Amino acid sequence: MNSTLSDVFRSHPIHIPLSTLPDFTSLRHLPDSYTWTPKDDLLFSAASASDQSLPSIDLADPQVATRVGHACATWGAFQITNHGVPSRLLDDIEFLTGSLFRLPVHQKLKVARSENGVSGYGVARIASFFNKQMWSEGFTVIGSPFDDFRKLWPNHHLKYCEIIKEYEEHMQKLAAKLMWLALGSLGVEEKHNKWAGPSSDFQGAQAAIQLNHYPICPEPDRAMGLAAHTDSTLLTILYQNNTAGLQVFRDDLGWVTVPPVPGSLVVNVGDLLHILTNGIFPSVLHRARVNHVRSRLSMAYLWGPPSDLMISPLPKLVDPLQSPLYPSLTWKQYLATKATHFNQSLSFIRNYDLSSDQLS
Ligand SMILES: C=C1C[C@]23C[C@@]1(O)CC[C@H]2[C@@]12CCC[C@@](C)(C(=O)O1)[C@H]2[C@@H]3C(=O)O
Ligand SMILES: O=C(O)CCC(=O)C(=O)O
Ligand SMILES: [Fe+2]
């Protein structure tokens, strides 16, 4: 039987006690366990020396594929407008996210993510790779949120389930469209990508929704909302509320803040698209900072292939005189690798000897 994303982490539990979640609202000073220095993250204070900003692309632009391709190759990320997701739906998902995190802690803990689970309330999975704690809380949706939502909102869960369903439908279509624009810019056609399906709709694609809340922070310069990471996806589509915090990293520029533009969405190239394009598109290193004036919400749609499907560099994008940069592997195997090797996962699989045992 095909596995789902929820199965992936059963063999990779994380041990982060939820009792470490502070009551963010009552703190006047940053506790030591939340105070980051460059020792805790080498890139912590890599300042941006540039006024360059992330490309913004109008999806109705006749040159859209070229622009998407260029943004993917240079930044591994871009913002989009005219994406077709109704602004009413963006308001709804933001409202849902705000309502969820405003619930009292004891209520949120009713749906706490289990150690070997992936859905539910808790700190980001990547927390286990850092000595310091992040100034955020999250909620992950994979599959139906019905059971969790009924515990959170006994009287309103159906309304909230409906919003998630509608959001997923729109995001799935948008992700497939963006994927074709990105691949199309490299001359990849449907015949080069067997997984595309007869109507190019990427049948069986799997996805997670990650809702993030970054509370107001008493000492934001010393805190970290969500530490630097790449997403393990093909693409991630992120909606941020009206508060800045997202930053993307470029080796030549340092950290670049992505200011929220009302109604626009941010698209990140994930590790699997980097592998599929044989390294042509970098997966973008990104993080979220916090501030002392306004709390921030972000809603990420993390999109990938069926979790058992073999992903490998597309032959069309591999120089016939060279070997592909990466071996074939499934999303499930990649997530297992990520659970062990985190930000070193791409270099780990690049040097991995396929003739030896199981990847992990
Ligand atoms: C599909 C997934 C990607 C993700 C792990 C997950 O199974 C569900 C949560 C996702 C998320 C969201 C926040 C950042 C991230 C690195 C994390 O810790 O959980 C990503 C994971 C990922 O992209 O590897
Ligand atoms: O909050 C943000 O802007 C980033 C969130 C993110 O990177 C994620 O959920 O994977
Ligand atoms: Fe991310």
Image: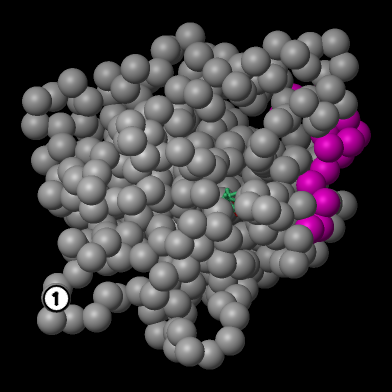
User: How many other residues sit within 10 Å of disc 1, few (<14), some (14-19) or many (≥20)?
Assistant: few
As drawn, 111 above or below 118 = above
Q: Residue at x 15, y 37 (%)?
A: 65
200, 345: nearer the viewer = 200
Residue 265: quarter of image: top left
77 sits left or right of 41 in the view:
left
Residue 19 among magenta residues: no
**Which span of residues is magenta-colored?**
101-116
268 sits left or right of 354 in the view:
left
315 sits left or right of 306 in the view:
left
Q: Residue at x 78, y 17 (%)?
A: 157
Residue of label 1: 320
Q: Residue at x 49, y 57 (%)?
A: 309
Residue 190 on image: x %, y %: 24, 44
Residue 138 on image: x %, y %: 67, 41
Residue 146 on image: x %, y %: 77, 26
As drawn, 315 above or below 6 = below
